[in-house]
Image (cartoon, rainbow, N blue to C red):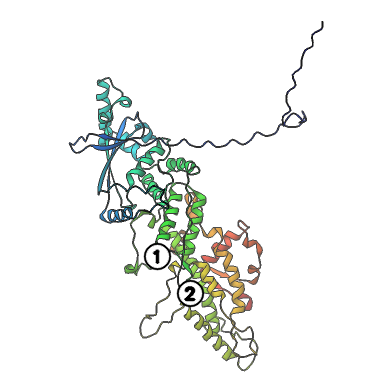
Amino acid sequence: MSSKTTKKIKPLTKDSNRNPSSPPSPAPAPVPAQPPAPPPVTVISIPDEEGGPPLNGINIVPDGDVVLDVTFDLSKETLKAARKANAIRPRPKSASQEPVPAQPPLKANTRFLYRTHLSTLKQHSKYFTSLLGDPRFTEAKAITAAFEKLGLDGRKPSQADIKDLPRVKIGIDDEATQLAGQETVFGDLLRLLHGQVMMTDPPSMAYLSTLAVLADRFGCAEPVGKSLHGQLKFKSFKWPATQVRLAREEDGVALTRAAEDLLRQKIYVSWLLDLPLRFQKAIGELIMYGSRQWKDEEDEDGLERNPAAWWYLPDELEDELKYRRACILNTIASVPQHFIALYSGTSPSRTRQCKLGYDSSASCDSYQLGETLKFLLKRNLVTLSYFSSPSSLPLSDHLTMEINHLLSILKQFPSYQIDKNHTNCGPRTRLKPILDFLTPMVSHKSVSITRQDWVKRRDEVSWLLSSERTNSSSFQDAPRKFAFTRSMAGDQRLRFEGSMGADRLVRGLFTAEEWDWTPDDT
């Protein structure tokens, strides 16, 4: 009796019908692993070496070999603002929702102990590398002596009780942040350095700003930024949009103080923690909206001072942004100045602008001059000075007027006629192509600053440094002049980012010292 072998047939798969000669299908992209949830924080009570009440301590790592004894000091102003904010608790939206728990009472001085790895601190922090690794510092000597004492007792520092480990005392105030709750932020800073997950979820922008301030102070902004950048992808954190308010009709939209504070925090965080795309966008917004900080230095009484670190941006950014906005405003202001000079006969050409050849042509120029000044005076874009004394007429505060809104005002310039025979004699016809040209220029990417360029090529990309070098040069060249032609307004290449020559044209336009907006008419 013959036996039959049963042949197992493999089930058809997606690749079963594939031609053997064809290349294999690509493997699916790996899904990034989500960081593990942080373990619950357990606050432990630790005896005070100085005989005071027990202190609160946190094990950043359970086998740490050094303890950071940190005292957090709050100023009276910060303490008052924090207590007021804690008193206003949001009410539950429904009866089933649990009420928001009350915050613990705030104190002017708070001490916290953090158990950490000495090697990790010295590896990632320049501050702790010097303080805890240089034998010239008392802290480094004390750690070495404590380790020797534990060794004589036959104990390893990683296995010793937290009360027996060497302590490093540090003081942190709120001068650079004006915010309370830094003990929680400092704990997350240490967790990021130790490769752990932040406890706060989601963090607020003020929280991240405080984190950036502390990271900068302790010389660990780069490792903190790398660790934080990966974690924010999985946390329910949304980069906040810049909120503006509708000011008076002639002023358009503007930044409130709170909105500018938030915008500056975004710049500060993205700069220190290396978020280049966020940095470039926020920089461009601050240039376009302006700052209440950028008043004339002679008007010290009108300046609004805020000691928070982000209210004076680091690495010469503050002065550069102020200068770039001033350059843009000077360029836009040169347009009405140019036409006032033309119609008043004070321009170098001194030619009559009405070309119709009527007996009333001279009166037409005077009429256009008067209507132009009337339009600009009504919108507070120009003021008059008298010979008897300095003018007391206030200009509108354009420090926080959005630049595109300023252009939109000039685009509303009407067409005036002294009579029905004089058509297109006013500046409106010639203003339109100029303003159409300026609109994409003020929004061009080269008006903003990229983080990489500011780090590596600051001398080349800085408008302010270039101007200072020119002014300090012993050879004074002719003033930098920009001549506008109608072909520029119709050049579509200038409207695209990265087009050849656009960056150079934008910089040449806004850093010029003189502008000729009607060279084709001469």
Q: Residue furthest top?
A: 1
Q: Residue furthest bottom?
A: 359
User: Which residue shows up at 73% across the image and 23% down it?
Assistant: 10
Label 1 residue SS: loop
User: Which residue shows up at 34% across the image and 47% down it?
Assistant: 101
Q: Position of residue 29 (x, y in %)?
A: 61, 36
Task: Please identify the quarter of the rendering in which residue 255 is found.
Answer: bottom left
Badge 2 is on which residue? Answer: 250
**Quadrant location of the C terminus in the rendered image:** bottom right
Asked whether residue 27 is in view, the answer is yes
Q: Position of residue 345 (x, y in %)?
A: 54, 85
Vertical placement of 429 versus 201: above or below? Answer: below
Q: Nearer the viewer, residue 164 or 353?
A: 164
Q: Position of residue 460 (x, y in %)?
A: 50, 55
Circles 1, 2 touching at the beta carbon (< 8 Å): no
- Report whether 218 appears left or right of 375: left
CA gap, disc 1 to disc 2?
Answer: 18 Å
Badge 1 is on which residue? Answer: 292
Vertical placement of 288 versus 459: above or below? Answer: below
Q: Disc 2 residue type?
A: Glu
Q: Disc 1 residue type?
A: Arg
Q: Nearer the viewer, residue 259 or 80?
A: 80
Q: Nearer the viewer, mark 1 or mark 2?
A: 2
Label 2 residue SS: loop
